Image (spheres, rainbow, N blue to C red):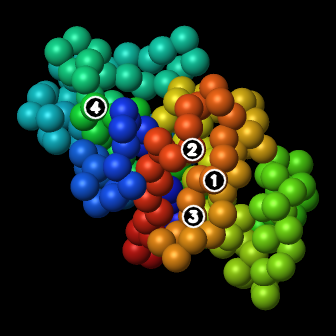
């Protein structure tokens, strides 16, 4: 599994370890909805009965906490047999999870959805396994940022550009509609098998 979590906040710190975000990993049965599990985790994290959790969907279908929890944000994603849930206060949060597996169409999808620089990076990978992992890292990072802002991939994955840095992927430019790239924080996580 590979996952990325992104959040934006006013005057965001580049120190993601200091960010007000919590996350949890849960076992999940494939083809079952993730919301009941996410609701349970969120309720426990917030000290609220899961059935009373004021979780609503906005016009794009993005989950939001409402009522007295309006300053909090949450997001979740599932793939394979795992579900990851994220919760933060004073942030907009997005998270994406993908199961690591061979991706025969990785370069074809990257040519369609990623920037030219990112496609060149994938073409330079020393092996198919390294390329497939890099593709998933980029995909998860892009989707996490878009989810944080209430967009889906139809917004355009090419409207975000990431680069490798010593600390992992870093957003280097994005569409102005998402704000400034330096105000977005990204944390890559690798859940266990």
Please give left or right for residue 163 compared with residue 156 in the image. left
For residue 90, which numbered disc appears in the image? 4
Q: Residue, x 14% and y 35% (percent of image)?
A: 46
Q: Quadrant of residue 55?
A: top left
What residue is pinned by disc 3?
A: 169
- Residue 144: which disc? none
Q: Residue at x 73, y 72 (%)?
A: 132
Q: Which residue is mark 1?
A: 172
Decide: is 125 above or below 21. Answer: below
| Residue that carries the numbered disc 2 in the rendered image | 181
Residue 5 position within the rendered picture, expressed as x and y whole percent measured from the top left:
45, 51
Mark 2 lies on a secondary structure that is: helix
Which one is earlier in the sequence, the residue at label 1 or at label 2?
1
**Disc number lying in front (3 or 2):** 2
Marks 3 and 2, Cα distance to the nearest angstrom? Answer: 12 Å
Q: Quadrant of the C terminus?
A: bottom left
Query: Is disc 4 placed on a helix, strand or loop?
Result: loop
Q: Please tell me whether residue 99 is drawn above or below residue 46 in the rendered image.
A: below
Whether residue 99 is situated above or below residue 41 in the rendered picture: below
- Using the image as rendered, state which of residue 32 and residue 15 is in the foreground: 15
- Whether residue 130 sits left or right of residue 145 in the image: it is right
Q: Is label 1 in contact with label 2 (beta carbons under 8 Å)?
A: yes
Q: Residue 107: name its quadrant.
A: bottom right
Q: How many other residues sit within 10 Å of disc 1, few (<14), some (14-19) or many (≥20)?
A: some
- Give the Cα separation between the discs numbered 4 and 3: 23 Å
The answer to which of marks 4 and 1 sits earlier in the sequence is 4
Is residue 76 visible from the viewing direction of this image?
no
Image position of 80 (left or right of 114): left
Q: Nearer the viewer, mark 4 or mark 2?
A: 2
């Amino acid at each position: 599994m590979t996952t990325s979590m992104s959040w934006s906040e006013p005057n965001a710190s580049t120190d993601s370890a200091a960010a007000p975000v919590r996350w949890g990993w849960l076992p999940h049965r494939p083809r079952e909805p993730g919301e009941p599990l996410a609701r349970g985790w969120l309720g426990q994290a917030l000290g609220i009965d899961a059935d009373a959790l004021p979780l609503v969907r906005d016009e794009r279908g993005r989950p939001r906490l409402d009522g007295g929890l309006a300053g909090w944000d949450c997001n979740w994603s599932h793939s394979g047999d795992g579900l990851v849930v994220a919760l933060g206060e004073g942030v907009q949060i997005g998270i994406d999870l993908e199961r690591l597996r061979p991706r025969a169409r990785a370069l074809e999808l990257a040519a369609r959805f990623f920037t030219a620089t990112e496609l060149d990076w994938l073409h330079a990978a020393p092996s198919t396994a390294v390329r497939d992992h890099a593709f998933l890292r980029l995909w998860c990072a892009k989707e996490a940022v878009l989810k944080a802002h209430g967009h889906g991939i139809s917004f355009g994955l090419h409207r975000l550009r990431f680069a490798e840095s010593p600390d992992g992927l870093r957003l280097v430019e994005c569409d102005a509609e998402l704000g400034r790239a330096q105000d977005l924080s990204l944390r890559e996580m690798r859940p266990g098998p």
